[in-house]
Amino acid sequence: MDWIALQLADASFPTGGFAHSGGLEAALQAGALEGPGALAHFLDDALWTAGHLTLPYVGAAHDEPTALVALDWAHDAALRSPVANRASRSQGRAHLDACLRAFGGPALHALRDACRAGSPRHLAPVLGATLGVLGVSRDDTLQVHLHSTARGIVSAAVRLGIAGPGEGQRLQASCAVTQRAVIAECARLTSASQCQTAPLVDLLGAGHDRLYSRLFTS
């Protein structure tokens, strides 16, 4: 894997992902994580959703970074949950700003300038476009996105007390099988074929703002 890809996949890269649980906190408070294997099932759903809903935009923006703004607005229309939409915008903007500070260069500045006309800057297309202009391969880019999805869920589970650190690492290691299957099935999906594969998880996450007490912003 490319050195830049490894840096971007590291939890210390400041994209603001630590503030988001991907709907896990809302699912926990709704009682949807009871029973053995519930957390693993939630993570599996999150990865397949990423494969079908966000990975197509990552790949499309990587293939054609100049189409970032059009893909950004298309992804905005696809993210119907206000909570998920807001979280995606927040992380996408943080990712672009962090890339500019870390790597700089005219290509990244051109992406930022293209987005200045009110573009929402969602994480999936922004990540695809930035890694594309940084020279990271398409396969590595897709893997970084899925790895970040899994890492975010596992990290949130540990902080919420659903799993211990060791159990969290075992869970993330075990989901490699799912990640490979998602890449195999979804790597070449176009943005026009995006879909939501876990509507219940999406509905639970959409209720996050109504939680009486919460640790995460989504």
Image (cartoon, helix red, strand yellow):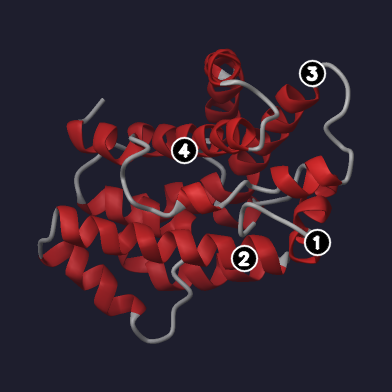
Give the x, y percent position of residue 202: 77, 52
Nearer the observer, disc 4 or disc 3?
3
Q: Which residue is mark 1?
A: 212
Q: Residues within 10 Å of mark 2 (few under 14, many from 20)?
A: many
Task: Find residue 37 and name its label.
Answer: 3
Q: Alpha-carbon distance for marks 3 and 2?
A: 28 Å
Contact between labelled residues 2 and 4, with CB atoms less than 8 Å apart: no
Residue positioned 29% across, 48% down in the render: 131
Asked if residue 97 shows in the view, the reply is yes
User: Along the polypeptide, which appears first: circle 4 or circle 2?
Assistant: 2
Q: Residue furthest bottom?
A: 117
Residue type indicated by callout 4: Ser
> Which residue type does callout 3 highlight?
Gly
Residue 1: x %, y % from top left = 26, 25
Secondary structure state at the residue bearing disc 4: helix
Kindly check if marks 4 and 3 are in contact, taking CB atoms under 8 A apart as contact: no
The tag earlier along the polypeptide, 3 or 2, is 3
Q: CA distance from mark 4 to mark 2?
A: 17 Å
Return the residue at label 2.
Answer: 85
| Between 43 and 133, the one nearer to me in the picture | 43
- Left or right of 88? Residue 197 is right
Give the mark toward the camera: 1 or 2: 1
